[in-house]
């Protein structure tokens, strides 16, 4: 599937930004601004079932195929968050960026309790600026607007399939030099998984006092954690 891909910038360097579940490319607005100012050309796709991309069958392997079909090969850096990080990890051998960053990656989404997905469905269906602010008091108003816009374009049927994903997605080794950003208060990353990834050859940086959406909970800490990678 060819994805809708947002493009911005005209620098000599290339960055790929892959959003997480229920969002769209707009979640990266703050990082996009920084990258464009640093001389990058940014490509930010909407995953299938998200944003302006088509709907279809939902499996990580198919989302990875979409990324390989829709994005340029050989970028200077590729960054994925959550489900987008999982899809990126499955496509990285074909995309071959110089560096890859997996931000609180969904390598073990199957460990999320099945009932949580129904809660997510209700959260998205009933979302308002007030409900998003209440759940995420540290987010900027731009982040709140981007989240609401992503929710409005999200295919809710995606969540029914998300609960059935296999949990065996922890990479055995990095394909390219790779950083894992692990949120200290993550619901999917654990100290044990951090150590497993380190043993597998990944650099792992734990970001303190943030939850799953590191780039929105504390953008400055998120950016500092990317030192040497962008």
Image (cartoon, grey):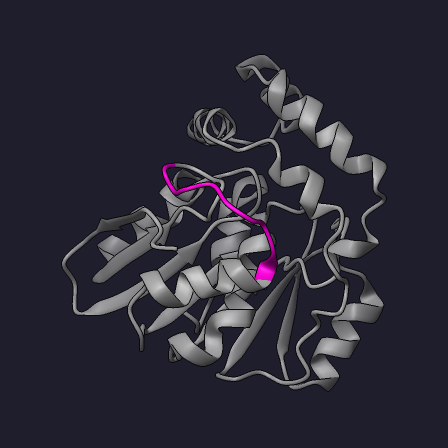
Position of residue 185 in the picture relative to residue 21 (left or right): right
Position of residue 174 in the picture relative to residue 26 (left or right): right
Q: Nearer the viewer, residue 167 or 129?
A: 167
Q: Quadrant of residue 168?
A: bottom right
| Residue located at (31% from left, 74% from top) | 73
Q: Quadrant of residue 107?
A: bottom right
Q: Is residue 75 visible?
A: yes
Tally of numbered tags? 0
Is 121 above or below relative to 226? above
Position of residue 187 in the picture relative to residue 161 (left or right): right
Q: Position of residue 103 (x, y in %)?
A: 57, 59
Q: Is residue 225 visible?
A: no
Q: Quadrant of the N terminus?
A: bottom left
Q: Quadrant of the C terminus?
A: bottom left
| Residue located at (42% from left, 78% from top) | 94
Given the current orientation, which residue lies at the most extreme left position?
Answer: 10
User: Was residue 54 drawn as part of the magenta stretch in this picture?
Assistant: yes
Q: Bounds of the magenta span? A: 52-60
Q: Position of residue 72 (x, y in %)?
A: 28, 68
Magenta span: predominant SS is loop
Q: Nearer the viewer, residue 5 or 185?
A: 5
Is 44 above or below relative to 160? below
């Amino acid at each position: 599937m060819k994805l809708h891909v947002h493009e911005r910038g005209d620098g000599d360097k290339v960055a790929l930004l892959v959003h997480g579940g229920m969002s769209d490319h707009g979640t990266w607005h703050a990082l996009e601004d920084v990258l464009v100012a640093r001389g990058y050309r940014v490509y930010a796709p909407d995953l299938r079932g998200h944003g302006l991309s088509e709907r279809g069958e939902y499996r990580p392997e198919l989302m990875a195929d979409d990324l390989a079909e829709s994005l340029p090969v050989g970028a200077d850096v590729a960054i994925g968050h959550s489900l987008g990080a999982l899809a990126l990890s499955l496509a990285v051998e074909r995309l071959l960026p110089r560096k890859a960053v997996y931000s609180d990656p969904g390598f073990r989404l199957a460990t999320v309790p099945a009932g949580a997905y129904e809660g997510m469905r209700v959260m998205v269906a009933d979302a308002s600026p007030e409900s998003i602010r209440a759940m995420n008091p540290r987010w900027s108003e731009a982040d709140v607007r981007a989240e609401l816009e992503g929710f409005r374009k999200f295919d809710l049927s995606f969540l029914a399939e998300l609960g059935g994903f296999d949990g065996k997605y922890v990479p055995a080794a990095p394909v390219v030099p790779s950083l894992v950003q692990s949120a200290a208060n993550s619901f999917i990353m654990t100290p044990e998984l951090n150590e497993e990834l380190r043993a597998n050859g990944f650099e792992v940086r734990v970001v303190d006092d943030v939850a799953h959406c590191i780039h929105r909970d504390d953008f400055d800490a998120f950016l500092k954690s990317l030192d040497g990678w962008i």
